[in-house]
Amino acid sequence: MERSPRVRARAVTLSAAVLGAVLALNAACSFGPPDPDVAGEPPNLPAPSVSAGPDSGSGGESAAAATVLAKGLEVPWGLAFLPDGGALVTERDTARILQVGPESGTEGLKVTEVQRLTEAEPGGDGGLLGIAVSPKYATDATVFVYYSTATDNRVAKLKLKGKPQPILTGIPHSANDNGGQLAFGPDGMLYVTTGDGTSGTLAQNPKSLGGKILRITTAGRPAPGNPVKNSPVWSSGHRNVRGIAWDAAKKMYASESNQKKTGELNVIQKGKNYGWPGVDGTGTNAKFTSPLVTWPIEDSNCAGVAVLESMVATACLQGQRMWMVDVTGNGTLLGQPRALLAGEFGRLRALVAAPDGSFWVTTSNQEEGADPAPEDDRIIRLVFSDGGAGRS
C-alpha cells in the first residue's frame, strides 16, 4: 500500500522570548550538524512559506511554519529517521510500520507500508509503540521496536520485513500507562521508557521494570555503568514516560504523563527517583527529584520530547499543544514556557528533531475520545523563521 500525501504549509507563531534565544545561538550556522546519535540526512522536502508576526524583531511574536507531510494515518506513535532521510513511523492500533519519504510524489512525501507486526496486540494505550534505528544501521540494518502482547510489553530487534526477535520481555502491561518510548542516547545505549501499569505499586519497586527509564545494550542486557550492576534501571519513580531526548551537552529530558494533577518535564539523572506515586508534580521530599517544569494535566499530558539548541519542546495530548521551554547551560528553566500549535491540530503525540533541524510532530486524533479532522492523523513538519530548517 502506498500513499502520496498532499503537503501544505501554514504559518504559526511562537513567542520571541523562546524563539529569539534559539535564533541567537544559531546566528553563525543555522542549526549545525546533528548529534552523534541521530542517523540520516534530511529528506527532500518542499520549502514551507514562513511569515513573521508583528514586531518580530522587538519582543513580539516570531513565526514558524507548519507543513503537513502525511495524512490519513491511524494513531502514529513512534518516529525515527533512516540514513537515507526517510522516517519510520509506527501505528499503535494497526501495528503497522510505515516509511515516510524520502521519495516524493506529485503532492509530497510518499507513505509506504513496510510491514505489520502480528506479534503486537493493541488495546487501550498498548500496541505497537516506540521505534529506534540502530546507530550502525548502515552495516547492521537493524531497528528496535516496543510493543504490547496479551501479557507484557517488550522490546525486540528486527530487520525490516523480518520477524521481531525479543531482547527484553516482562515489562508490566495494562490498559493504560505502558510507557513505550525507545531512543539511542549519545552513549550508544538503548533507553526504554515504561509505565507504572498499576495504581502506583511498581514505580518504587527496584525489582520491577514498571515506572522506570531503562538503559540496555542492543542485546537487551543491563548496560555497563547503570546505577545498580545487573539491573537495567536508569531512573525510577515514573508514572508514564512517553518522550525522551538529549541536548548537545548530553543532558536527558523526559515527559511525565497520566498523573492525576500535573504533567511534567524532567531532567533525567542517573539513579534519581522522580517520586511517583508519592509526589504528583513538585514535592518537598528531598529523596525525590523535582521536575524542571510542571503544567496542569488538562494543559499537558505530554508525550514526545525534542531538543533544538537551548530549546526543549514536548508534544501534548490532552493539552493539544506543544510546550516550548528555554533552558540554561546547566539544565535549569530560563523564562516562562510558551505554547505553540494550541488547538491547531488537536492531540499531539510523537515529536522528533529531524536531521535538518526541523521538528516532526504527529497528531493522535484517530483514537477513542478524540475529534478527528478529515485529514487525521497527520505528520507535521515545523520550521522556525530566520533561515528555516537546515544548515546555513
Image: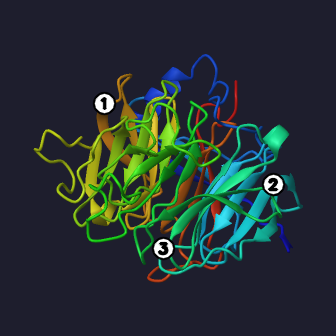
* Chain-order first, disc 3 or disc 1: 3
Q: Are marks 3 and 1 in contact (CB under 8 Å)?
A: no
C-alpha distance separating marks 1 and 2: 37 Å
Q: Residue furthest front?
A: 230
Q: Looking at the rendering, in which quadrant would you find the C terminus?
A: top right
C-alpha distance separating marks 3 and 2: 27 Å
**Mark 2 residue type:** Gly
Identify the image quadrant of residue 36: top right
Question: How dense is the environment of label 2, judged by Cα within 10 Å: few (below 14), some, or many (20 and up)?
Answer: many
**Mark 1 residue type:** Thr
Residue beneath the point at 81% across and 54% down: 101
Measured as percent of width and height from the top left, residue 107 is found at 83, 62
Q: Residue furthest top?
A: 28
Is residue 262 toward the left or the right of residue 267 in the image? left
User: Relative to the observer, which residue lies in front, 16 or 39?
Assistant: 39
Residue beneath the point at 23% across and 50% down: 275
* Chain-order first, disc 3 or disc 2: 2
Residue beneath the point at 56% across and 45% down: 221
Question: How dense is the environment of label 3, judged by Cα within 10 Å: few (below 14), some, or many (20 and up)?
Answer: some
C-alpha distance separating marks 3 and 1: 32 Å
Q: Are marks 1 and 2 in contact (CB under 8 Å)?
A: no
Residue ID for mark 2:
101
Residue ID for mark 3:
125
Could one spot residue 302 in this view of the protein? yes
* Foreground label between 3 and 2: 3
User: Relative to the observer, which residue lies in front, 141 or 242?
Assistant: 141
For label 3, the SS is loop
**Mark 3 residue type:** Asp
Residue ID for mark 1:
332
Is residue 262 toward the left or the right of residue 286 in the image? right
Is residue 388 toward the left or the right of residue 21 in the image? right
